Amino acid sequence: EKGGYDYFMLKEIAEQPKAVADTLLGRIDAEGLLRLDEVRIPVHELREVDKVVIVACGTAFHAGLIAKYAIEHWTRIPCEVELASEFRYRDPILGARSLVIAISQSGETMDTLMALRHAREQGSKVLAICNTNGSTIPRESDAVLYTHAGPEVAVASTKAFLTQLVACYLVALYLGQVRGTKWGDEIGAVIRDLAQIGGEVERVLETMEPVRELARSLADKNTVLFLGRHVGYPVALEGALKLKELAYMHAEGFAAGELKHGPIALIEPDLPVVVVVPSPRGRSVLHDKIVSNIQEIRARGARTIVIAEEGDEAVVPYADHLIRIPATPTLLQPLVATVPLQVFACELATARGNEVDQPRNLAKSVTVE
Ligand code: M6R
């Protein structure tokens, strides 16, 4: 049932191009418009939404952090993202025009369920993004957009994460479509790129041998840091979470701009630091800033592991290890940038002799608060 792979996690990483394509299937029509009639929230209500609030835990929370960038950029609706476990205890401000999005692979996470119940009690509409048909979270929500990742068995989430991102992009674009905001050439191009993205994920998977080699060479390290900016910041958080779960190593993700506000004190010779570099095209300010962050940490002896777009030559002089990913629009980059981090964590876990599919102390779905 592992399809020839040693672990479910490896199988699920390999299934990502298909999971992404399946999640898009039937949702973009021949004219490049989104068809999300399955989201049974009336269009007039979606037009009136004045705030989006995303609640989720763990990896699904990281998908939510990325969704915020997409939702605010493409729809101009303010969006908050909150850990489900924190949400209801602070008495959040919600109303009938708030759209709450609950993201959950299993659909059974108690913290997320309690957050959505709280939102509905306040009169807000709840849209679930979920991978498990008929599970509790979609049953208790007003509407659901299913991710079509197929069953995810490994405790560490991989293909579910990529499909959560796809679903979030679809929701963001759909909100833009029904509201007519920013609906121009950019959005049309993004939809075309999204339709191709499964192929790009496939290309990344074909080039992972050096990442595995690198992971094995770091098996005796104690700490790995992850840095990113913009959507690369949640990707850094996700890379760190995967490493904690699987390799039982100390790993932390930071916004690269925060370095000089504290974390740079952690940099010491030979410390592995993974940096997710935004595209040099488009938002080049971000790119230039992160290149100078890489210079700063390298000057202090860090071992820089740089994830950068093909053709980005500016990072080459400062990268001890360079992992190439295909060029994508900035907001879609997490779909390709996360994959090497999954492979990295999985290989490190194996090299350290850990149980990949069932890490210690963890459960696949956390049904207690
Ligand atoms: O089933 P859910 O998506 O609600 O689960 C949320 C988290 O428990 C989950 O993403 C967890 O962080 C994973 N083990 C991450 O790999």
Image: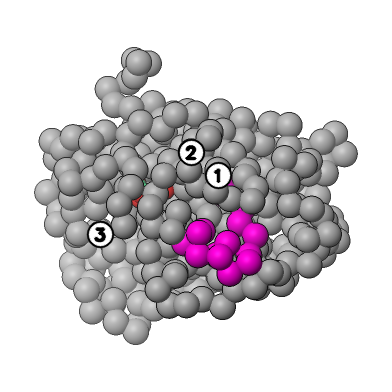
- The span picked out in magenta is 115-129
- Residue 49 or 252: which is nearer the viewer? 49
Kindly identify the residue that appears in the image at 49 percent across and 29 percent down: 150
Give the secondary structure at mark 1: helix
Q: Is residue 212 visible?
A: no
Q: Where does label 3 land, which residue?
A: 251
Return the x and y of residue 260 as percentages of the image width and height.
35, 82
Q: Quadrant of the N terminus?
A: top left
Q: Where does label 2 land, which residue?
A: 135
Amino acid type, mark 1: Pro
Left or right of 121 in this view: 329: right
Q: Which mark is residue 92?
A: none
Amino acid type, mark 3: Ala
Left or right of 221 in this view: 34: right
Q: Where does label 1 land, which residue?
A: 138
Callout 3 crowding tier (Cα within 10 Å): few <14, some 14–19, many ≥20: many
2 or 3: tag closer to the N-terminus: 2
Residue 234 placement: quadrant:
bottom left
Return the x and y of residue 286 as percentages of the image width and height.
55, 71
